[in-house]
């Protein structure tokens, strides 16, 4: 017997075998069991989701020799003929090749005749939206009042192209796209029945590549089995589909979080050697951000089906929730702008660089890849994401360049970018220093000693001055006085401004957050406030934020009240101004209070 492709071999023969379209099956099964049969059905959906399959199963249910039933026997002559595609009472029409009105008239002339052997004469018209307008007009009367022995089954991928007069005469069922999870479950069952060894991560690659089509997934699986020599492995599927390694995507994300533009461009350059689809690469980057956000907000919903759970946990702990949303939004805008870029690669690079340029500095808690003017010793630590990626890629040749670059940064301590600007600055600084030293040498000994004494005194004062201004005793201070000195920003500043001080001890500071702003809270903000307090006081301060009813005035409320007072004072001054009063009296003018903006002392130039 010749080989039969998986998509045909495992095509469902009954409604019970069909999965993923329960909303359609429930309506059809109930109609069959209650004998409430419509004369025309329209099945709409993308390719490979089961439109024609459902139509053929419905034809079996209508013409099964055991009677109209939701569970056809599959053994009678009618069921067998329909399954083998040779039933004379199931007329299948390809509308794409028979679009003319003459074809439709020929078809409709035979509608009046009784079925040959079956209970109903069933017309299954595939891709019905391809029919011409005249063809639709010719069938309207028959479609509205067909003979009792005729049933119409329509299938289409574009129901919007059908005339409204046709849609109104049919029961319409919209079939859903298959989710990757459902596709993986089906492929697992098929491969187990076939006795083919497989890796689950490879099935996820196929499930995503199928883009909602079960038929495409089975066709790709057939191809993967041949490509992988009777085995479906992640490496062979990636090679077959031409997709990049997932570790490359996480490497890019790690570089973006670290704000390392040099590493981003280097990795994109290395990927460009494989001629990837940068639009698809950006889609994968956004998919990873989506999974990171789910990990942060609903960790139990994340499984290891992609084989990246450890990486997800590392990324989720390295970036705040709001920053994930910001990166995702920038990526979505980058997708929209990609067609307008000179080429896909430059558009992809600019999207990643935009993420680095517009993300707050607070998300970077690891050391930068290099510091201009630094000595290159110490302070360089690898992020948890990089550590995991290094462990996963120990046996991969492509990691050699990345590791060599990392070692070079520590051993040579050379800047990776803009060396000319740095060297010119250092040369200029060295020349100025040498000039100052030569000038000092030319002076007499007594003046030189006096200069050294003055210089020493200035250095001591300079070292003592920051300590006097930076270190502050906050015991007994109100939260309205402490907050402006912390120099917070972003959501952390908003959260802190809506808190009041509940308790202030030597090592612990408890804040009470207004219930209306409870959605702003997460552990990251507590840590940022604690670090800022540590910098201000000179010792570690534990911060605890509780959510409750705030009775005292918060810094945000104080700022709003002061703003209102300044606005009222400014409006009062404007109303009392003699020039303005003259203009109003002589020219019937009106004072636009919305245009009055009080100027704070810090705003004056």
Image (cartoon, rainbow, N blue to C red):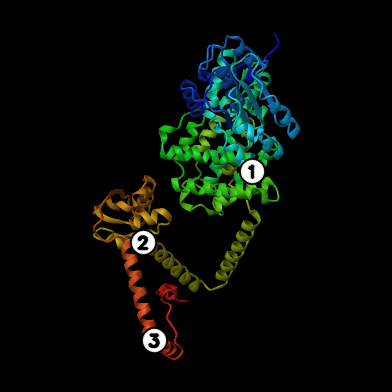
Q: Which residue is mark 3?
A: 577
- Residue drawn at (41%, 90%) of the image: 585
Rendered-image quadrant of the N terminus: top right
Mark sitting on residue 266: 1
Residue 320, can we see it?
A: no
Marks 3 and 1, how far apart in space?
63 Å
- Residue 596 appears at what percent x and percent y? 42, 76
Q: Which residue is mark 2?
A: 485
- Residue 478 appears at what percent x and percent y? 27, 61
- To which quarter of the image does residue 140 belong? top right
Marks 2 and 3, how far apart in space?
37 Å
Q: Earlier in the sequence, mark 2 or mark 1?
A: 1
Q: Earlier in the sequence, mark 2 or mark 3?
A: 2
- To which quarter of the image does residue 75 belong? top right
Identify the element where label 1 is drawn.
helix
- Camera-side residue of 214 and 504: 214
Q: Is residue 288 left or right of residue 219?
A: left
Q: Is residue 490 left or right of residue 281?
A: left
Identify the element where label 2 is drawn.
helix
Identify the element where label 3 is drawn.
loop
Mark 3 or 1: in front is 3
- Camera-side residue of 201 and 72: 72
């Amino acid at each position: 017997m010749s080989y039969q492709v998986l998509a045909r071999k495992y095509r469902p023969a009954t409604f019970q075998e069909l999965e993923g379209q329960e909303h359609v099956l429930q309506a059809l099964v109930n109609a069959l069991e209650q004998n409430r049969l419509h004369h025309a059905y329209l099945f709409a959906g993308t390719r490979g989701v089961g439109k024609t399959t459902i139509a053929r199963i419905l034809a079996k249910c209508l013409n099964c020799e055991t009677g109209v039933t939701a569970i056809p026997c599959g053994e009678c002559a009618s069921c067998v003929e329909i399954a083998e595609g040779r039933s004379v009472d199931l007329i299948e029409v390809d509308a794409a090749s028979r679009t003319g009105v003459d074809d439709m008239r020929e078809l409709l002339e035979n509608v009046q005749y009784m079925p040959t052997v079956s209970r109903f004469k069933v017309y299954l018209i595939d891709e019905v939206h391809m029919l011409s307008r005249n063809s639709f007009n010719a069938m309207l009367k028959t479609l509205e009042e067909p003979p009792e022995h005729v049933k119409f089954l329509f299938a289409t991928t574009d129901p919007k192209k059908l005339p409204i007069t046709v849609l109104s005469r049919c029961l319409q069922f919209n079939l859903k796209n298959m989710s990757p999870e459902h596709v993986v479950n089906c492929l697992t069952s098929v491969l187990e029945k076939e006795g083919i060894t497989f890796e689950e991560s490879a099935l996820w690659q196929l499930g995503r590549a199928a883009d909602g089509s079960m038929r495409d997934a089975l066709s790709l699986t057939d191809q993967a089995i041949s490509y992988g020599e009777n085995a479906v492995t992640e490496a062979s599927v990636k090679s077959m589909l031409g997709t990049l390694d997932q570790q490359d995507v996480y490497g890019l994300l790690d570089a973006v979080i670290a704000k390392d533009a040099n590493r981003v461009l280097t990795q994109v350059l290395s990927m460009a050697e494989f001629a990837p689809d940068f639009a698809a690469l950006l889609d994968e980057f956004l998919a990873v951000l989506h999974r990171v956000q789910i990990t942060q907000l609903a960790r139990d919903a994340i499984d290891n089906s992609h084989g990246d759970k450890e990486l997800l946990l590392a990324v989720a702990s390295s970036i705040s929730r709001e920053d994930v949303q910001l990166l995702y939004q920038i990526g979505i805008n980058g997708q929209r702008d990609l067609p307008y870029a000179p080429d896909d690669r430059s558009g992809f690079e600019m999207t990643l660089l935009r993420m680095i340029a517009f993300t707050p500095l607070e998300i970077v808690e690891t050391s930068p890849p290099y510091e201009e003017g630094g000595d290159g010793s110490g302070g360089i630590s690898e992020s948890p994401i990089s550590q995991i990626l290094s462990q996963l890629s120990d046996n991969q040749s492509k990691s050699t360049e990345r590791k060599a670059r990392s070692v070079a940064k520590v051993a040579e301590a050379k800047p990776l970018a803009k060396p000319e600007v740095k060297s010119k600055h250092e040369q200029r600084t060295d020349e100025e220093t040498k000039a100052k030293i030569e000038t000092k040498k030319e002076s007499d000994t007594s003046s030189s000693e006096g200069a050294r004494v003055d210089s020493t005194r200035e250095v001591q004062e300079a070292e003592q001055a920051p300590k006097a201004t930076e270190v502050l005793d906050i015991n007994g201070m109100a939260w309205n006085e402490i907050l402006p000195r912390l120099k917070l920003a972003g959501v952390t500043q908003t959260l802190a401004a809506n808190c009041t001080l509940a308790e202030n001890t030597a090592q612990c500071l408890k804040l009470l957050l207004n219930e209306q702003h409870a959605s702003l809270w997460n552990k990251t903000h507590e840590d940022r406030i604690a670090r800022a307090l540590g910098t201000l006081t000179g010792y570690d301060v534990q911060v605890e934020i509780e959510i409750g009813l705030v009775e005292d005035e918060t810094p945000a409320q104080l700022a709003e009240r002061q703003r209102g007072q300044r606005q009222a004072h400014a409006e009062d001054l404007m109303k009392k101004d003699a020039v303005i009063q003259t203009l109003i009296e002589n020219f019937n003018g009106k004072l636009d209070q919305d245009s009055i903006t009080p100027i704070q002392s810090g705003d004056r130039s």
